[in-house]
Image (cartoon, coloured by chain):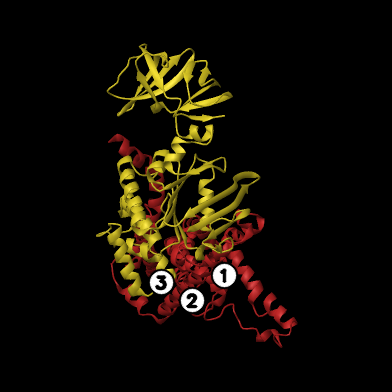
Amino acid sequence: MAIIYLKNINKSYDNKVVLKDINLIINEGQLVVLLGPSGSGKTTLLHGIAGMIDFDQGDIFFGDQLMNHVSIDKRNAVLVDQNLLLFPHMTVESNIAFGLKMRRVKKSVIKQKVDELIRLLELEGHEKKYPNELSGGQMQRVAIARALAIEPEVLLLDEPFSKLDIMLRKNMQEFVRALQKKLNITLIMVTHDQEEALSMADQVALLLYGEIKQYASPNEIYEKPVSKEVADFFGVRNYFEGKIIDGEFHSPLGRFSTHLSDCEKITFMFRPEQISFGEKQKDSIEGIVKRRVYSGDKVMYTIDVRDFEIYVSSFIHKDFKVGEEVALQANFDKAVYFI
Amino acid sequence: MRKKIKPYIMLIPVMVFILGIFIVGIVSGLLQSFGYFPAIGLKTLTLQYYKDVLSSPSFIRALRFSFSTSFISSLVAVVLGVLFSYLLLYDRRRKGGPLVNIYKVPIIVPHTIAALLIFILFTQSGWVARLMYHLGFIEDMKYFKPLIFDRQGLGVIMAYVWKGLPFITLVTFDILRSVENKYAKTAANLGANHFQVFWYILLPLILPTVASGFIIIFAFSFGAFEIPYLLGPSTPKALPILSYIHYNSVNLADRPYAMVINMCIALCGFITVGLYVLTFQFIKKYNNQ
C-alpha cells in the first residue's frame, strides 16, 4: 500500500527552482533514501513532507488523505534534523516524552512508552541526563526515540549520521536499519553519501538540480543507471563511445564483440570494478599504468590507452607499478549503454 | 607562564581605576556607617547607627517602598517585554524597519526626562486627565486618580516600566529569535501548538536571559535616586531619598545614618549580583550542546 504519494511537487526560492515536478510513491514500511549533492533540493523535499514549508505546487497524500493544508503539528510526519535539536533544558526522558505530553497523553501511558523506547534505543542509565552530557551516538538515539514516541506515519531523517565519526556512523546505520525493520515504520532519509544510501535503502531516489533522475532499488540504480548523470553521481566511470557494425563495437580503443544490433552512436559505461586486468588477447585493451592510488582494500589505477584514460579498481593482491604495461578485459555484453 | 600573566598585567590600569573607586567608596562608607568619621571627631567603631536605622519605622517604610516599586516595575517590565518580544517575532516587520526600532527610543531617554514625561501625562492636570475629562469619562479633572506622588508609587512604577520594558525587549528579542529559529519548528513537528511552543520551549530557554534582565533593572531601580525623587510621595520615601536627606543634613553627625542606608542598598546590590551569577551557572548547565 502506498502510504506517501508526492504528486507534481514544485518549489522555488527567489525565482530559483529548487524542486521540479517531483513524483514519488513510498510504500508502507519502506526505507527510502533521497540521495543527492548539496543544493539538490532533498532537504527542502523532506521539510515539505514534514509540513515545515509549503510547496508552490503539487499535492502530498498520506494514504488517501491530502496533507497540503494540514499544519506541521497535526501532520504526524516527524523530522530528525541533522543537528538533532534536542531540547537542551530537558532531560533524556523529558525529550522523549515531549510529543506525548503535547498531545496530553496520560502520565502513566507516557511513562510506559518512554521506558519502552529507552530500552529499545539502548539508553538505560541516561534517563536523567541532559543532552550536553551525552555522546553523539546517544544524542542521535534520543532524537530518534523522541520522534518514535508519537508513532509517526513516517519518520524523516535529514543527514542523520553526517556528524558522526566513521565507526559510530556504521553502527548507527545498522541500528536504524534494524530498528526500521523491527518496527516496520516508513522512513525517508536524506543523505549525500552514496554508500550510506545503497547500504540502507529499500528504494533510492536520486535528486539532481531539483529533479528525481531515477527512483529504483539500490542494485538497479547502481548497476543500471538510466542516464550518464545518474551514473556519474555514483563515482568514477569509463565511457566508451562508438558504433556497432555487424555485432562489433567500433571505438577509438579498438573493436569488441557484442550481441547488440547495429547502431550509429552508442556509449558503453563501465565502472572501475567492471574492468579487470588479464592476459593479452583479441578483445583486450592494452595500456600503460599512469597513476596508482592505494585506498586500503583496493587500488585505483589510471591506465593510459592511446590518449584515453581508463579507470580500473583492483584488489590489492594484483599490484602493478606506474609505467607497467597491462591488458584490460571488459565485457561489453554486460555493460550498461546509452544510445 | 608569561603569556598567562600578560592579560592581567595589561588590565591593571583599568582595574585600578574601576576597583579603586569602588573599594575606596565602599570602605569609606562602611567605616562611616560604623561611626568612624574622624572629620567630626567620631573615632569609635559602633553598631549603634545600624541599630537606630534598622529599628526606625521610616527606614522600614522606605525599604518596603523601594522594594515594592522596584520589584513590581521590574516584574511588569519583564512580563510585558517578553510578550512584546514575542509579538515582534511574529510581526511581519521582524526583519527590522524603523517602526520596529521605535520601541528602543525610551532606552536613550534619560531618567529625569522619563520622569518629566510621566509627570506631564499623569498628574491630575496632565494630558491623560484632560483627555478623560474632555471625553466625558470624569466630571472634573480632580476626580482623576492621583498617580504621581501617590503612596503606592504608581508614578515611579510607570516611569521604571517605561524605561525597563524596551531594555528587556532588547535583551530578549535576539535570544528569542535565535531560540525560535532553532527549536520552534522541531517542537511543532512533534505536535506542539503555538502556545505550547512558547510555554515549554521558548520561555524556559530565554528564562535565564530574562532573569538576568530582571536582576539588572531591579538592582538599578532599587538604588536609583532621580525618579522616586521627582515622582515619589513625600512619605514613604525611597531608600536613596532617605539616604540623601541624611547625607545632606546640616548636622554632619547624621552622615553615618546615610552610610548605613547606603550599605543596605549596596548589600541588596551584592545579593542581586549573586543571583545574577547563579543565573549564569544555570545557563551553563545546558547551553553547551
| Among numbered discs 2 and 3, the one appearing first in the sequence | 2
Q: Is residue B91 left or right of residue A311?
A: right
Q: Position of residue A50 (x, y in %)?
A: 50, 57
**Marks 3 & 1 on one chain:** yes
- Which residue is under mark 1? B159
| Colour used to depict chain B in the structure image | red
- Which residue is under mark 3? B254
Q: Position of residue A112 (x, y in %)?
A: 31, 70
The chain coloured yellow in the image: A
- Which residue is under mark 2? B237
Mark 2, other Cα within 10 Å: few <14 / some 14–19 / many ≥20: many
Tell me the kind of residue under disc 3. Asp
Q: Nearer the viewer, residue B91 or B235?
A: B91
Say whether marks 1 and 2 touch (CB < 8 Å): no
| Among numbered discs 3 and 1, the one appearing first in the sequence | 1
Q: Secondary structure at mark 3?
A: helix
Residue shown at 43%/28% (left/top)?
A: A271
**Marks 2 & 3 on one chain:** yes
Tell me the kind of residue under disc 2. Lys
Question: Is residue B270 among the parts visible in the rendering?
Answer: no
Q: Tell me where residue A296 sits by quadrant.
A: top left
Tell me the kind of residue under disc 1. Ala
